[in-house]
Amino acid sequence: MHDPQAETIVAPATATGEAALAVVRIAGAAAFTITSKFFRGADLAHAESHRAYHGWIVDPNGARIDEVLVLTLRAPAGYTGEDSTEIFCHGSPQVVEDVLATAIAAGARLAEPGEFTRRAFLNGKLDLCQAEAVADLIAAQSRAGRSAAVAQLQGTLSQRLRHARNALLDVLSDVEASIDFVEEGLEFFDREGTAAAAATAAAEVGALLSTAGDGALIRSGVHVSLAGAPNVGKSSVFNRLIESPRALVTEHPGTTRDVLRENIRLDGVALMVEDTAGLRESSDLVERLGIERSRESHAKADIVVHVLDASRTPTAMEIESIGRLIADQAVVVLNKVDLLPAVEAQELLASPTATQALVASRFSTGELPACVAASAVTGAGFDGLRRALIRQTRLRALTLQNDSVVVINVRHCESLLRAQDALCRFDHDLVAGEPPEILAAELRRAVIALGEVSGENVTEEVLSRVFARFCIGK
């Protein structure tokens, strides 16, 4: 049977486009032999590992393609655990294409997405959690995402899972030892001790699952939705936040008809900011559809930024909207303070307390979110708005994650939920006095589910799904 892993593979390891340098990676049993066919500069057949050799890449006719450095990595030291070479060439797309074509002509095969990392997993260089962390690290859009991926790449999550799984394996072996002696009424495990060990493992699973929400925020970014009535300056606030004139700004109400999205970084955390249609009653069908999308955006948002016009009294709809805000998931922006008398504007910009008091007096509501005075026209107050966003509970929690383990993968959550369910059933059966056969079945389910996360128990289908999201050169 044909074994794809026996083939030597090649792919660019750097992004396409013009650059000073590019890297082409070759891995497999024939990596040195294949590279030697088109590299002129050193005898790679006897090359040492972790050495760089200067020379030229030539085409099948001997014509020079590019002056390069070739890094040699002998098994098992290479990334995949196999012999591999990495060719550092100039970053011209044409040069990279010609180097790839030459390597393929010499006997290599173009790698599939994630195939290098998949081989690293199959060769025991990484477990599945660490392999997935590679893709997460490449895709990280924020400092928090990078930190979480690095922690997972270092094996922190794997170690916690392995500890819980090994504890359950010890319990399972004792329970299974009693199965053959059920008729004699013999049990080789202490039910109280078994319950305690399983409860400890269940607590660890629960602790990891509790980070799933933060993990999703780290992965996709914090969803920030701008809300407010027409003409309060939402689009201007949006443009100031993203530091780009992305949204169309006019004096006519109802200009924004659809949701505009932009990604920014704030204090190391990725934010997806949405500008939405102003909330009001409208007979215009298109505007009504835009308002409906606005409400959907606000409902799904992690943080709602509600914009008010400081130069006018609030409407009944605005008072109702502010009253529905959740204090630790919202920020109120008192925009257009540049239209107020200079002394009043300066007082509001200098004092969040004064801004809070003014908003409270106008809205006569209960607990208010943080309130910030600002002018989207001049940019005044926007440092305060950014600080208010950072202070929000959910966002602040992410910036303080440090090296704590965060489950940032949906696949992990699915497996951990199955493990949690099996441990709950085990606890119920243990209390009910069920025989060892029943107890062992639930323990096996939990052990298998935990093994799916780090890759001890995983199907080909799962592996294909995991590595399909990788880029070709990784």
Image: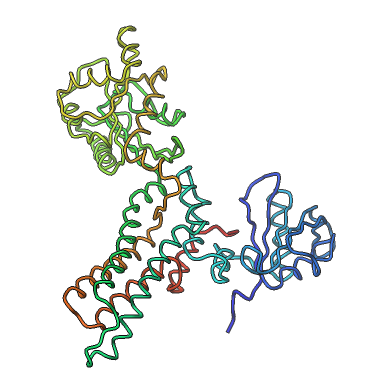
Horizontal relation, residue 127 to residue 383: left or right: right
Q: Is residue 26 above or below residue 393?
A: below
Of residues 403 and 54, the one nearer the viewer is 403
- Counting from the top left corner in percent of width and height, residue 221 is at 40, 44
Q: Residue at x 28, y 73 (%)?
A: 194
Horizontal relation, residue 443 to residue 283: left or right: right
Occupied quadrant, residue 167: bottom left
Occupied quadrant, residue 258: top left
Horizontal relation, residue 225 to residue 64: left or right: left
Q: Is residue 172 above or below residue 41?
A: below
- Counting from the top left corner in percent of width and height, residue 60 is at 80, 65
Q: Residue at x 32, y 35 (%)?
A: 392
Of residues 16 and 269, the one nearer the viewer is 269
The mark total stands at: 0
Q: Check the image and tell me how it is coloured.
A: rainbow
Task: Name the residue furthest bottom.
Answer: 183
Q: Is residue 427 above or below residue 396?
A: below
- Counting from the top left corner in percent of width and height, residue 365 is at 15, 26
Q: Quadrant of the N terminus?
A: bottom right
Of residues 317 and 467, the one nearer the viewer is 467
Q: Quadrant of the C terminus?
A: bottom right
- Counting from the top left corner in percent of width and height, residue 216 is at 37, 50
Q: Is residue 1 above or below residue 326?
A: below
Occupied quadrant, residue 389: top left
